[in-house]
Amino acid sequence: MINQYIRQHGKRLYGLCLYLCANPFEADDLYQETWLKVVKNISQYDPTKEFEPWLTKICVNTYRNALRRLARSPFINFTSNETKDLMMQSVSEPEKEDYSELYKAINNLPEKFRLTVILFYFRGHDIGSTAQILNVPSGTIKSRLNKARKLLKEALNNETDLRL
């Protein structure tokens, strides 16, 4: 049964992992950890609902948990936001040169806006499923998308052809 889900949703899940991590090695770990959690918790899945939002929610929560662990790690203790920003800017970006500035601007968004943009625009989830995955009201998703567009427009020097 799990093999069917992996065949059907594996590529999209891996793409999401790459968007979230921006590093193939970390994306591989996130992908594997997500499927391990799916196997462990498959009894909690409601087959009357779509599988992909449930899977995506597990992936996003796994990613968030990893970020929390990293933030609490004694090995990476940022002394200031500037240090953290320098570290975040050193993370490799997707290869597409046409959109490199946009990807950079998205990666620099606060995490709640970044996740919302990735799920809605890049993963194709609608407002409702994005809200379900992030466990917030639909109105919050709309608000975050609006704020994210404004922040991206500012970051991209008020370019008028920003089409999100």
Image (cartoon, rainbow, N blue to C red):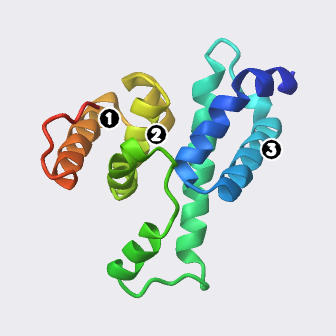
Left or right: where 40 falls relative to 12:
right
Say if 50 sits above or below 161 in the image.
Answer: above
- The answer to which of marks 2 and 1 sits earlier in the sequence is 2
| Left or right for 124, reference 140 | right
In the rendered structure, which amino acid carries the disc numbered 2?
Leu
Q: Are marks 2 and 1 in contact (CB under 8 Å)?
A: yes
Q: How many marks?
A: 3
Q: Which residue is mark 3?
A: 36
Where residue 140 sits: x, y (%)? 29, 37
Q: Amino acid at mark 1?
A: Ile
Badge number at residue 47? none
Q: CA distance from mark 2 to mark 3?
A: 20 Å
Q: Which residue is mark 1?
A: 141
x%, y% of residue 53?
A: 57, 27
**Residue in front for this viewpoint, 15 or 79:** 15
Q: Which residue is mark 2?
A: 134
Q: Dot 3: what SS?
A: helix
Q: Secondary structure at mark 1?
A: helix
Image quadrant where one finds the C terminus:
top left
